[in-house]
């Protein structure tokens, strides 16, 4: 595919319209823009949206003006660069991401880029499989992770489209895959209250032991942080299982929210866990952009692993590091949309990493207190409990809550899932639009399903709070306004 034909207008310069188009390409149907609204399935546009109260980063983010400019500059480099400009950009992306994560330069040589977090789960399952025995994937209940994840870890299609465009049916087995099973472990009680860590860990341990006894290999997915802000199972539980069943258990940390500090990331890699992150949620880059960080202890064997040929529908050769032999089976096909989305995300990550961590933690504490007060004042927003996160570094910013889930209450109590989804859309269409995290199923009350909305902080909002005049007060005021708008729309339901 000729890069210039994709990225430039007739006069050879990057075309803003085409850049916006690329930001919505190279993924699956979730990021295709609706021709009527100009929004993707997450309610996000492919261009900056001034005036939006952007608190939807637990689902996806709308690109900022400065990040859009960073993507445009990357497009210009590709347009004016040599034939291998895309390959050079992807190598540079790996190095910059590794550096911003506080990792040694060598870590970039084992960093795999992909279109989305769900794609990363497919890749991790492929790496964890021996190609002969079925793989059993253990994960937190799918409502807390991603809708397509159970299919991805079972070696099945998880969307109708793929990043490289081949259409098919979700759930269809991938060619050559030994399809396994996915077991979801509940992390909340039916009432919506988080289950005790010990109980969740015990369920993971029992399920893992049964799968190993049945002759399966296991991919244990540790979610950090889930859609509603939980961690499950505990890192210590995952380490115990990896040690107990040495060689038969691989651990994937689903950190696709990227709400983790460099210290937490380093701890996971020291435990020999694979770590999946994305740039489209906490960081604030546009959906889709994903990366799989592979620790040295795992990389030594995996670099020589044969890859499932069907991965060619999801990955190109340059998305994988050069030392990995399996990349030769992949097509030499660029995904400029993914590259530009990562450029936008790295722009936001660089700004966030420049902040003092104690200042970040201080603002998060103040923000959490203000949100709690605002929900209490609203009277019809019921906060969903979220336990304090346990981190290795004392006082770490990532121990603080950044996703605030709540039940909007109407005249008859919690509205139906359909009403909650309509409320979410109504906030986006308001005169002062509000973007919250999409509705998530969290339990049952009086025989009726409970569906929560989420007010979510992003790295971009934290940077604004700590680097602009009166920034913290302005971000908190916008959050208060977003919650007041949600309470007003919910009241008559």
Image: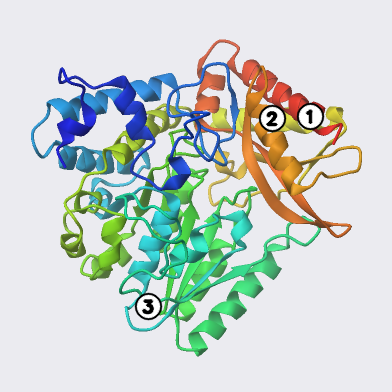
Rendered image quadrant of residue 329? bottom left
> Within 10 Å of the Cα at label 2, are there few (<14), some (14-19), or many (20+) other Cα atoms?
some
Q: Residue furthest front?
A: 36
Q: What kind of element bears circle 1?
A: helix
Tell me how far mark 3 sits from mark 1, CA to CA. Answer: 48 Å
Q: Nearer the viewer, mark 2 or mark 3?
A: 2
Tell me how far mark 1 sits from mark 2, CA to CA. Answer: 8 Å
Q: Earlier in the sequence, mark 1 or mark 2?
A: 2
Q: Is residue 405 visible in this depiction of the protein?
A: no
Whether pointer 2 and pointer 3 mark residues with C-beta atoms closer than 8 Å, the reply is no
Q: Earlier in the sequence, mark 2 or mark 3?
A: 3
User: What residue is shown at x 51% (from left), y 29% (from top)?
Assistant: 36
Whether pointer 1 and pointer 2 mark residues with C-beta atoms closer than 8 Å, the reply is yes
Q: Position of residue 253 (x, y in %)?
A: 47, 58
Q: What kind of element bears circle 2?
A: helix
- Per the image, the residue denoted by label 2 is 426
User: What residue is shown at x 35% (from left), y 39% (from top)?
Assistant: 25
Give the camera-side residue of 97 and 483: 483
- Per the image, the residue denoted by label 1 is 489
How many numbered dots are placed on residues in this image? 3
- Per the image, the residue denoted by label 3 is 178
Instruction: Locate the N terminus by quadrant.
Output: top left
């Amino acid at each position: 595919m000729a890069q210039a034909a994709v990225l430039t207008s007739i006069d050879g310069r990057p075309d803003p319209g085409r850049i916006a188009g690329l930001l919505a390409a190279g993924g699956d149907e979730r990021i295709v823009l609706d021709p009527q609204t100009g929004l993707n399935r997450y309610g996000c546009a492919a261009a900056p949206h001034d005036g939006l109260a952007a608190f939807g980063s637990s689902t996806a983010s709308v690109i900022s003006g400065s990040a859009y400019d960073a993507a445009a500059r990357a497009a210009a480099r590709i347009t004016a660069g040599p034939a291998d400009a895309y390959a050079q950009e992807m190598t540079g992306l790996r190095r910059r991401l590794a550096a911003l994560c506080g990792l040694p330069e060598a870590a970039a040589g084992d960093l795999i880029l992909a279109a989305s977090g769900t794609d990363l789960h497919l890749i991790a399952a492929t790496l964890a499989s021996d190609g002969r025995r079925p793989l059993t994937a253990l994960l937190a209940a799918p409502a807390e992770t991603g809708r397509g994840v159970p299919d991805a870890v079972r070696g099945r299609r998880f969307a109708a489209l793929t990043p490289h465009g081949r259409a098919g049916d979700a759930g269809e087995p991938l060619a050559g895959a030994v399809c396994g099973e996915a077991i979801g472990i509940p992390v909340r009680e039916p009432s919506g209250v988080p289950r005790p860590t010990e109980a969740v860990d015990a369920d993971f341990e029992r399920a893992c032991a049964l799968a190993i006894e049945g002759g399966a290999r296991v991919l244990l997915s540790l979610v950090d942080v889930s859609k509603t802000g939980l961690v499950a199972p505990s890192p210590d539980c995952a380490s115990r299982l990896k040690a107990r069943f040495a060689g038969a258990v691989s651990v994937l940390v689903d950190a696709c929210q990227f709400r983790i500090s460099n210290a937490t990331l380093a701890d996971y890699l020291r435990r020999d866990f694979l770590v999946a992150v994305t740039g489209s949620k906490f960081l604030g880059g546009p959906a889709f952009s994903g990366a799989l960080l592979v620790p040295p202890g795992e990389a030594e064997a995996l670099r020589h692993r044969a890859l499932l040929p069907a991965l060619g529908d999801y990955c190109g050769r340059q998305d994988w590091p050069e030392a990995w032999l399996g990349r030769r089976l992949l097509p030499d096909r660029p995904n400029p949309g993914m590259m530009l989305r990562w450029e936008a995300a790295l722009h936001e990550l660089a700004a966030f990493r420049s902040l003092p961590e104690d200042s970040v933690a201080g603002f998060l504490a103040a923000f959490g207190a203000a949100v709690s007060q605002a929900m209490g004042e609203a009277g019809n927003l019921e906060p969903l409990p979220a336990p304090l996160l346990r981190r290795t570094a004392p006082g770490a910013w990532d121990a603080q809550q950044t996703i605030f889930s709540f039940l909007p209450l109407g005249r008859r109590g919690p509205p139906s899932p359909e009403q909650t989804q309509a409320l979410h859309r109504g906030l986006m269409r308001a005169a002062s639009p509000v973007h919250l995290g999409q509705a998530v199923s969290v339990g049952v009350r009086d025989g009726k399903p409970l569906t929560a909305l989420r007010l979510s902080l992003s790295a971009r909002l934290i940077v604004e709070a700590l680097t602009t005049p009166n920034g913290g007060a302005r971000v908190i005021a916008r959050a208060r306004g977003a919650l007041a708008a949600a309470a007003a729309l919910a009241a008559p339901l």
